[in-house]
């Protein structure tokens, strides 16, 4: 009987271990939901260069769990195409309960440059299966789009200037540290309205939404929604701004 009892005990311990590995965190999300769509005007100096859209069109089942399908698109306007044509698209599937990604896609068309990249994040086995290979990842690793939506769910009410949120960002074949620095509050006015905002700065080593050599500042509404109102990206030849022009489907 002892061998049988030992076998049963071993199987029980193994089952508990597997169940523990498959359990995921549950985080509160009061910031966004399916149906949200944000539209931005992208400008360089006094010139309107493009239109950007961030949208959550639907919920989808992936790896047996509900996930937000989130898209981010940037298109240059026709008048700017002859100078520098842009047709960029990012796609992520964000776990609805745990706020971590299951899949990420990047389709870049900028001038004569193009790049297509995809990754499936096996968050159970901590492996990223990408279009360029297989790589180990830490649990709850983020892509750059999912990280942004995760940050929107955070409570900044007790933050002081210089406080940081520390995340792990996967891109291409590696996991990079991603720090989001809090810079205080400010009231800003854009075409979509006047908003009280918090200011954050993502310090991205790789895989950013802009191929820049400078910093990125983001103004988020200082409320439950925390929608981005303005983005300032400093590059070698100047500043690029993205400002909110319209929105719909806000959760609050």
Image: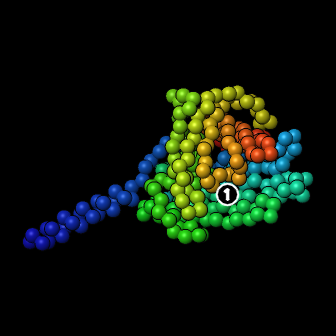
Nearest the eye: 235 or 85: 235
Residue position for label 1:
90
103 to 197, vertically: above or below: below
Which residue in the rendered view is the most extreme toward the left?
A: 1
Is residue 221 rendered to the left or right of residue 153? right
221 to 95, vertically: above or below: above
161 to 240, vertically: above or below: above
Is residue 67 rendered to the left or right of residue 22? right
Q: In the image, residue 102 lies at what x, y percent?
A: 53, 59
Q: In the image, residue 213 lies at what x, y percent?
A: 70, 48
Q: In the image, residue 111 lies at what x, y percent?
A: 81, 60
Q: Quadrant of the C terminus?
A: top right
223 to 235, vertically: above or below: above
Query: Label 1: how many residues lie within 10 Å, few (<14), some (14-19) or many (20+)?
Result: many
Secondary structure state at the residue bearing disc 1: strand
Residue 179 visible in the current orientation: yes
Q: State the count of labels.
A: 1
Is residue 23 rendered to the left or right of residue 55? left
- Determine the residue positioned at 30% across, 60% down: 17
Residue 40 visible in the current orientation: no
- Determine the residue positioned at 71% across, 41% down: 231
């Amino acid at each position: 009987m002892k061998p049988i009892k030992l076998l049963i005990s071993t199987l029980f311990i193994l089952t508990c271990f597997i169940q523990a590995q498959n359990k995921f965190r549950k985080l509160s999300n009061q910031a966004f939901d399916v149906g949200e769509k944000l539209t931005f005007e992208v400008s360089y100096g006094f010139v309107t260069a493009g239109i950007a859209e961030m949208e959550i069109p639907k919920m989808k089942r992936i790896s047996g769990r509900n996930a937000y399908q989130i898209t981010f698109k940037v298109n240059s306007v026709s008048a700017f195409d002859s100078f520098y044509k842009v047709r960029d698209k990012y796609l992520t599937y964000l776990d609805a309960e745990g706020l971590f990604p299951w899949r990420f896609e990047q389709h870049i068309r900028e001038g004569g440059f193009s790049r297509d990249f995809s990754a499936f994040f096996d968050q159970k086995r901590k492996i990223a299966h990408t279009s360029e290979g297989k790589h180990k990842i830490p649990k709850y690793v983020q892509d750059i789009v999912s990280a942004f939506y995760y940050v929107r769910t955070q409570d900044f009410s007790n933050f002081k200037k210089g406080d940081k949120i520390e995340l792990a960002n996967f891109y291409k074949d590696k996991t990079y540290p991603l720090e989001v620095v809090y810079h205080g509050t400010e009231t800003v006015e854009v075409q979509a309205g006047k908003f009280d905002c918090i200011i954050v700065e993502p310090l991205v080593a790789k895989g950013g939404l802009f191929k820049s050599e400078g910093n990125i500042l983001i103004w988020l509404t200082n409320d439950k929604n925390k929608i981005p109102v303005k983005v300032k990206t400093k590059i070698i030849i100047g500043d690029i701004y993205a400002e909110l022009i319209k929105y719909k489907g806000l959760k609050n």
